[in-house]
Image: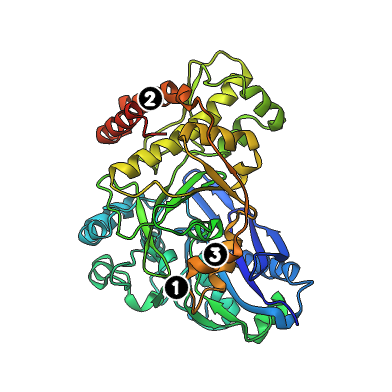
Amino acid sequence: MTEAVWLGVDLGTQSVRALAVTASGKIAGSGVHGLTGRREEDRHEQDPRHWWRATAAACRQALAGVPPGAVRAVAVDGTSGTVLLTDEDGDPLTPGLMYDDTRAADQTRRVNEAGATVWEELGYRRMQPAWALPKLLWLLDRHPGPVRVAHQADFVNRRLAGHAVPADLSNALKTGAHLIEEAWPADVMDALGVPLGALPPLVRSGTPIGAVCAAAAEVTGVPEGTPIIAGMTDGCAAQLGAGRLSVGSWNSVLGTTLVLKGVTRELVRDPYGAVYSHRAPDGAWLPGGASSTGAGAISRDFPGRDLRELDRLAARHEPARALAYPLVSPGERFPFTAPDARGFLLGSTGEEADDYAAVLQGIAYLERLSFDHLDLLGAPIDGDLTLTGGATRSAYWCRLRADVLGRPVTLPAHPEPALGAAVLAASPGRRVAEVAAEMVAVRETIDPGPHGDRFDGGYLRLVGELERRGWLPAPTAAHARARTERGTSR
């Protein structure tokens, strides 16, 4: 008998990745195809047609050795807050305005005035310029004719199905979807001049939304009639791909930037607007946030260097003499919101190894501050912690993060959003946590060393500096100090 597989497609920033995964988590096939975009100051665009071509190529690669009758379903995840306008037939009228495009600062004020009550009810209080709804207003101001709104995953799903499809609540969060009522807030959209008829219907992630059409089957290799399952954002898919979906568990994705997401029974409300919550397929909540710090600072500041060698040298600088706040791009989003925040390196001795160690430690300190802020909000943070993202290739950095956080960290065997999308594809009719437990394998668990408190001084230096510059709210800073003093911050 042919072993069944589920296909997960991850629409990333630099590439589309497809994985064909069996029920036991075996990777039966994989494919990847690169993407390009245009960046200029506060703008970041991609051509949606390129998403489809890359999806088709990645799927063909992933399924090259898979018997056609083995494919049971497909699900697609996409970058959070990426949005475009299409015509009635789903063809793009605009570029895709990407997740970190912040051109819509003026529209953000309108959005936050019109939606203040709803955003307060949903716990994040206010939207940020990179969110989809402000960018949607920017697009609508320039395209007043009949249009349809699509998120990145919607665009690809429509091509797969050959007809219009619903949007999942996860990708629709930053477009203003009311995740408690699971509907668009009509009064808010009317006040902003967004036609409700231009918005897609909404469904929970994990809902069947169509089947692969003949035209899509021909170019992708996904068999005609294969069910299409509503996906999620890439950060939420990474949470599923980490396999830890019990209340209080967290997944920290450290790639170009740092994204932290967890699982709670109740909606987490953040008076400072840094934490927002997605809705899980089973109705639980997935709170978290995306920082502007991350490993992108390393590729920028240490180009062409042997990072393995730098890791070895950095181990001699614990803690580093320098103090780093390594932002990848201007402005901070999590664990605090500060549009005027800028990265810094203080007390540098000019020694490369110490500066490098300071960057690794600075990112780990931001990760620790994220948990302190979540604890301040009352979120449960004492469950399992998995680490995913490109930074997990550095064994040293994983161990350093365990030491700074003072808690064990688990590394999944295949830590990527495409695996989470495959988990979602296999979930209809079952609890997604059960599916993930079967499909996600653990590579190893790293316990913290016995002297993690050696990093407390550096951590508190960074907390103090962020507060002094007016970026970090005083209550979060005070809570971080109190937890450090009690020994509960790590």
- To which quarter of the image does residue 350 belong? top right
Q: Residue, x 41% and y 73% (percent of image)?
A: 204
Q: Amino acid at mark 1?
A: Ala
Q: Which residue is mark 2?
A: 460
Q: Which residue is mark 3?
A: 436
Q: Amino acid at mark 2?
A: Leu
Between 80 and 271, the one nearer to me in the picture: 271
Dot 3 falls on a residue whose secondary structure is helix
Whole-Å distance between the Cαs marked 2 and 3? 37 Å
Check whether the beta carbons of the residues at disc 2 and disc 3 lie within 8 A of each other.
no
Does residue 65 sit above or below 129 in this rendering? below
Q: Residue furthest left?
A: 117
The location of residue 392, given as percent across then percent down, is: 61, 43
Q: Which residue is mark 1?
A: 167
Q: Amino acid at mark 3?
A: Ala
- To which quarter of the image does residue 336 belong? top left
**Numbered disc in front, either 3 or 1:** 3
* Residue 45 visible in this rendered orientation of the protein: yes
Whole-Å distance between the Cαs marked 2 and 1? 43 Å
Q: Residue furthest right?
A: 65
